[in-house]
Image (tube, grey):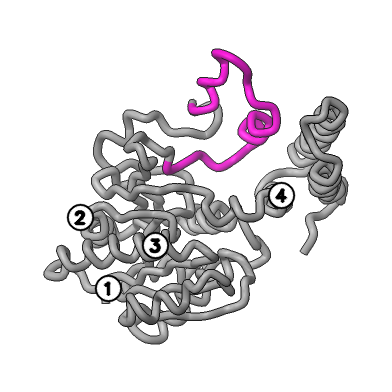
Amino acid sequence: MDLGLVIVNWNVRDLLAACLDSVYLDLAQSSSDISAVVCVVDNGSQDGSAAMLRKQFPRTLLIEAENRGMGAGNNLGWQALQAQVDPAAFLILNPDTLVRPGALRQLVSFLRAHPRAGVAAPKLVNPDGSLQHTAFHFPGLTQAALDLFPLPGRLARLMNSPLNGRYPAFRYSGGPFRVDHTLGAAFAVRAAAAREVGLFDETFHMYCEEIDWHWRLARAGWERWVVPAAEVMHYGGQSTAQIKLDALRKLWISRRRLYYRYHNPALNAVLSVLVQTAMRRRIRANFRASQRGRLAAADRAEQNLALTDIIQVWQRRRPPV
């Protein structure tokens, strides 16, 4: 078996159906070149996703699980596929994506031709066809600072520059290129690489699990690539939009864990000050917005609770388990 696709779903039934339509269409067109099995791990959806899968996509392997996060969900899918078909590579795919024709063949062909490639990721595009940055340098202090304190006016263009971890846009118009890490929305990973470094760290409930995983691959000597000839459209943020404040909280908890693991104490100390300063700044902004009638008292209280939780996490000497 060439490819095992793993899609972790949470309450995005219609997007999932469209994603699977695009996957099976591409597989039908590539059937002479690659063999594949699709697995959907449904993380306790309440929108009828599982029933839709049974009715419309009966050949899809469905795993119904409690929601223990993206990493845990992907691990369940990997383990099930490995036990049943033992694919040479896995494709991690978000349900809010559409696979463009030929993308799966391009990724499998690249992995076949490059034995030290642990990851091959497609080029991601937005719904309007514009480029969505697919890959990034491993995050350091500058990237975190720019996220916490976005640049104003004309300086905002630097947010999409190498200063903020982006690779130049022109790279996505050429041949394959090596990167530090890719987005978790879509990437193929060689099964041998996954066996060597292990699967996703499930302590990252949401966010940063793919960065941690790529960092482990890098330390083990596996290459990570973007293959622009393979294209996937990505809506982005469709599941997390349902839980914005909880997503914000989990983002900065995961970043605390990631930075603690891969950066020295001095950098972590500086970043801790920046995070706490930024979150207190948002609390003060919420107060002003509330005074002007732009933010309801209940919303202000809920937002400030999430911001306070983030401050407390970054005040600790170690991230929470």
Estimate the x, y position of residue 212 in percent, counting from the top left.
Answer: 58, 55
Q: Height in image: 180 above or below 174?
A: below
Q: Quadrant of residue 270?
A: top right
Q: Quadrant of residue 144?
A: top right
In the image, taking residue 198 as reference, residue 295 lies left or right, namely: right
The residue labelled by disc 2 is 102
Residue 36 is marked as: 1
Q: Marks 4/3: CA distance?
A: 31 Å
Using the image as rendered, state which of residue 304 and residue 113 is in the foreground: 304
- Residue drawn at (49%, 28%), measured in percent from left and top? 160
Given contact means CB atoms under 8 Å apart, are the residues at marks 4 and 1 in contact?
no
Given contact means CB atoms under 8 Å apart, are the residues at marks 3 and 2 in contact?
no
Question: Which mark is first along the chain, 1 or 3?
Answer: 1
Residue 186 is marked as: none
| Amino acid at dot 3 | Val
The residue labelled by disc 4 is 245
Using the image as rendered, state which of residue 133 and residue 22 is in the foreground: 22
